[in-house]
Image (cartoon, rainbow, N blue to C red):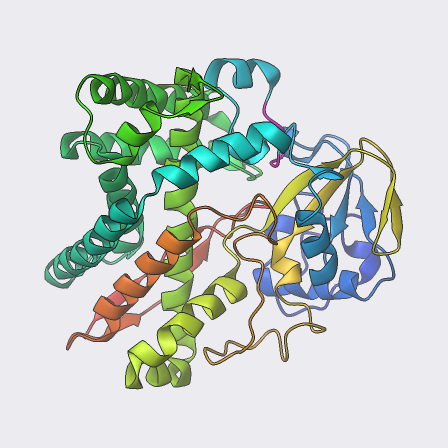
Amino acid sequence: MNVPAQLSGDRVPRLEEVNLADPLFWRLPRPERLRAFALLRELDAPVEFTPRPGASRTFTSAFHALVKHADVRAASRNPQIFASAPGVTAPEPARWARAVFGNSMVNMDGAEHAAMRRIVSRSFTPRLLAAAEENIHRAARRLVDEVTRESPGNFMPSAPSRLPLEVICDLMGIPGHCRPGIAELIDHASEHVGVERRGRARLRVPGRGLRALARMQLVMARLARERRRRPEDDLVSALVRADIDGQALSSRQLGAFFSLLLVAGVETTRNAIAHGLSLLTLHPDQRELLESDFDRHIDAAVDEIVRHSTPIIQFRRTVTTEYTLGGRTFLPGDKVALVYASANRDGTVFTDPDSFDITRSPNPHLGYGGGGPHHCLGAHLARLEMKALLRELLTRKHVFRQVGETELVDSNFDNRVRSLPFTLQ
């Protein structure tokens, strides 16, 4: 079932045209993809999708797509059957890459994942989080001050990208002079995740993302050595003193976690912030309501922004044993995609799911995962960052206005924003 390239954003696709394993599908306008998800949700069982011949490495394995809220939630909460190992992205990380860079916590299961998550959770002490919240508000004010003075035409490189980076670097104790280089490495490490490259992008130097990860881990290794000698009140100092069953965390374990925190923590939050600003521009009634009583509505508004935009489109799972879910019996080794972008528009859970409503309640979205052991550790920080930046942008005398179309990146992994043209009035 290959999707014709000529389909427009206004056309309702036919079921036989929909193939989530075809890169052409992910080049379609987002509204059309959402209508395709709606067609799939009407079926009695999850569909298996097969890549077309000659597809890129991102689209080389068949998988079943879980598109209903109940199915995604159930699989998320049953990691014994729907395992994260060997990897939640496509393509899966190579064994040699895991050996060199360490295994990311999102790709772990069972006791290994529980031990790492417990260590990280304990390291986020109340004192550390309180300091982080204060830093978030201070950074948001400073960054919006800069935007007001400089008024760049594209909003993305400014506050949405810099706030989550500043927050995470403050948490980790990364010196200021290292941060511009870290930002560049994050861009290189994540620029082609889940993307079917076209045109000049196909000519990029092979391994650029891996080299960026390697350089990022070298920065972290140097910082970890420094904190072992002279600990401070930051996350790196807490983690280098932690251990698993009496064994200190290895450099690869620390490096893998730091890379995950930097890349995932920055990318997902920056995209959520950008989508939120765009949604509030496209729905002036909702913006007016939020501005009328910011403190009353902001928590629900953040949840609705995350639901409506769904920064992470999907994660993969590998079935470990024969199991029936949603009318389909899966076999060991089957690949399953948890399509959060579809689950968050499920009409059996959300009334009028395509509307943007900051008063929506309840709002059991799966934007931070469907619960279970892999629920996003950074969800609390991400919410604080969104709330702080929106407060600064919406409660000042200068009015933020989007002045052009939001430019998205073709991706089957994240709902990434390339540019957000704006002005201040």
Please provide the residue range marked out in magenta. 88-93
Q: Nearer the viewer, residue 18 or 218?
A: 218
Position of 261 with respect to 22 (left or right) is left
Position of 249 with respect to 308 (left or right) is left
Q: Residue at x 42, y 62 (%)?
A: 275
Residue 336, position as x, y percentages in the image: 74, 42
Q: Is residue 384 magenta?
A: no
Q: Nearer the viewer, residue 131 or 142?
A: 131
Quarter location, residue 17? bottom right
Vertical side of 66 occupied by 299: above or below: below
Quarter location, residue 11? bottom right
Q: Residue at x 52, y 48 (%)?
A: 414
Q: Residue at x 61, y 54 (%)?
A: 370
Quarter location, residue 150? bottom left
- The overriding secondary structure of the stretch rendered in magenta is loop
Residue 310, position as x, y percentages in the image: 53, 58
Q: Residue at x 47, y 36 (%)?
A: 118
